[in-house]
Amino acid sequence: MSDCIFCKIIARQIPSQLVYEDEHAIAFKDMTPQAPTHVLIVPRKHVAGLSACGDGDQALLGHLQRVAAAVAEKAGIASGYRLVTNNGRSAGQSVDHLHYHLLGGRSMQWPPG
Ligand code: AMP
């Protein structure tokens, strides 16, 4: 998608602080971190969000969670982290390319705001 900021990061058209990449996913530091560790786990394939995923995306969705766990391990936060996806504007989604926020390095509150 030519107007998608995450597609541009994946295509290296704009810079990012990459922490992981493979054939199906990349992970980079959020530009507005909400925790000491705040990494976005993003599929290379453009899909607008979790609700836009279909049965054919099942393996990809599982893969993204495996990537998140690996990134958490590498970041030293495996003992406590939160993995979040915002789906839709009312949930706080601002970029319409599926992504998971990996947050850690501080205490978390529940329920989230
Ligand atoms: P969401 O609001 O759940 O859609 O999350 C989008 C996230 O992308 C926000 O936390 C932004 O800070 C982050 N973000 C937007 N543009 C960039 C960028 N160019 N590099 C890194 N993070 C970004």
Image (cartoon, rainbow, N blue to C red):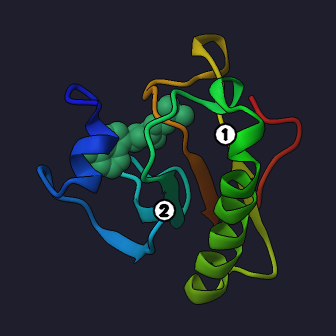
Q: Quadrant of ligand 1?
A: top left
- On screen, residue 97 versus residue 31, left or right, reads right
Residue type for callout 1 = Thr
Residue 66 in picture, x, y percent from top left: 71, 71
Q: Does 29 appear above or below 18? A: above
Asked whether mark 1 and ligand 1 are closer than 8 Å, the reply comes as: yes
Q: Secondary structure at mark 1?
A: loop
Camera-nearest residue between 99 and 44:
44
Camera-nearest residue between 92 and 57:
57
Q: Does 5 appear above or below 105? A: above
- Residue 85 bears which disc, if any? 1
Q: Does 24 appear above or below 55? A: below
Cα–Cα gap, marks 1 and 2: 15 Å
Camera-nearest residue between 61 and 109:
61
The C terminus, quarter of image: top right
Q: Residue at x 64, y 60 (%)?
A: 64
Q: Residue at x 61, y 49 (%)?
A: 100
- When asked about the image quadrant of residue 28, the answer is bottom left
- Residue that mark 2 sits on: 25
Q: Is residue 105 visible?
A: no
Are dots 1 and 2 in contact, CB under 8 Å? no
First in residue order: circle 1 vs circle 2: 2
Residue type for callout 2 = Ala
Q: Is residue 85 visible?
A: yes
Total number of numbered labels?
Answer: 2
Residue 34 in picture, x, y percent from top left: 52, 50
- On screen, residue 43 versus residue 15, left or right, reads right
Q: Around disc 2, counting alpha carbons within 10 Å, would you say few (fewer than 14), some (14 to 19), or many (20 or more)?
A: some
